[in-house]
Image (tube, helix red, strand yellow):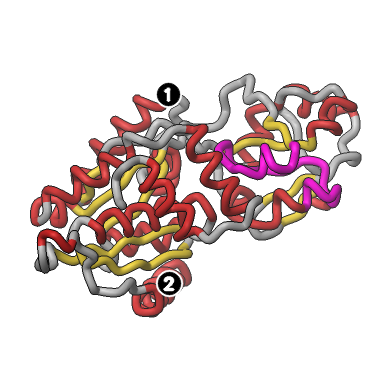
Amino acid sequence: MKKLMIVLIGLMLISSLVACNSSSTNVQTDSSKGSEEVKGKVVVGGKDFTEQQILSKIASIYLKENGYEVEEASNMGSTVVRSALENGQIDMYWEYTGTALVVFQKQQVETDPEAAYEKVKETDKANGLAWLNKANFNNTYAILMKQEKAEELGIHSISDLAKYMNEKPDELKFASNAEFYAREDGIKGLEKHYGFKFPAKNVVKMDSGLLYNALKDGQVDVSVGFATDGRIKGFNLVALEDDQLFFPAYNAAPVVRQEIIDKYPEVAELLNTIAGKLDTETMMELNYSVDVEHKEVSTVAREWLQQQGLVQ
């Protein structure tokens, strides 16, 4: 009952988010073609961190430029945005294969990107959800340290970290967001897989957006992060090698209600075009532009689309 109430409250909030984040319904058109009618309406959802905000904005701008009325509902948690898609309150969002596989479909962790993608794509057909082409970047979890600190302690892999923690269990502080702390493919599974444990008193839970700064400023020694985050480069951090292959593949792909694809087949073509142009280096640069250079998400999204020749 408690879980049901949480989901219901989350879904009620989505309606407010949609209203608050609605884009203008005026469709931008090529003046040489004259006025064009709106092709249809698409509600684009997104999660509550930078990469998701960028991906959602790219999709929103591109769909709008191609004649669709777009509403945006962003900054949602994983469970809430998934529920919104299943319940038809949003029409699409970018999801990660590992999240869908482990959290929503309750399947075993899959480290092979192609295998993970094919599994989630096939399973979600029964839910009326279409996985479009996956992008060529894997935003899996990463265990991060300051490069200087890692070199000083001789820690280059998660196995090295496990060995160090078993020898000196109280020395290092670890920063985690709430989701990674709670998930089975998060800290609990990591500790079990590599055979070590961070003492509870040495685990500092904080918002995802604060993790990198806490590590950079020396408030913690180790932190969870995301492999494509631009702050890894910007803050001189290093991702420890996942040498025992614990973390699942987390390739992003547009996930769209099949009803929308059937109604507007062009939507799939447009979103697949975007996915085909994104890779790890590109995603890191886009994240870097927002998180380190402090550019507006909408500016970064539009500039990238312009660079790709997708919008003017």
Query: Which of the 4 image quadrants contains residue 86?
Result: bottom left
x and y percentages locating residue 243 in the rendered image: 63, 20
x and y percentages locating residue 160 in the rendered image: 77, 23
Compared to residue 111, the image places residue 306 above or below, namely: below
Q: Name the residue under label 1.
A: 112
Estimate how packed mark 1 is, as few (under 14), some (14 to 19) or many (20 or more) residues with alpha carbons within 10 Å: few
Q: State the count of labels.
A: 2
Q: Residue at x 23, y 36 (%)?
A: 122
Q: How far apart are marks 1 and 2 (CA)?
A: 32 Å
Amino acid type indicated by mark 2: Gly
x and y percentages locating residue 164 in the rendered image: 84, 27
- Mark 2 lies on a secondary structure that is helix
Amino acid type indicated by mark 1: Asp
Task: Indicate left or right for 211 with 41 as reference.
Answer: right
Q: Mark 2 points at which residue?
A: 10
N-term mark: 1 or 2: 2
Q: Which of 219 and 65 is in front in this view?
A: 65
* The N terminus - image quarter: bottom left
Q: Residue at x 45, y 67 (%)?
A: 3
Q: Residue at x 55, y 47 (%)?
A: 287
- Mark 1 lies on a secondary structure that is loop
Q: Nearer the viewer, residue 11 or 271?
A: 271
Task: Indicate left or right for 253 with 207 as reference.
Answer: left
Magenta includes 215? yes
Magenta includes 246? no
Which label was assigned to residue 124? none
Which segment did they paint magenta?
214-236
Task: Indicate left or right for 38 with 181 as reference.
Answer: left
Estimate how packed mark 2 is, as few (under 14), some (14 to 19) or many (20 or more) residues with alpha carbons within 10 Å: some
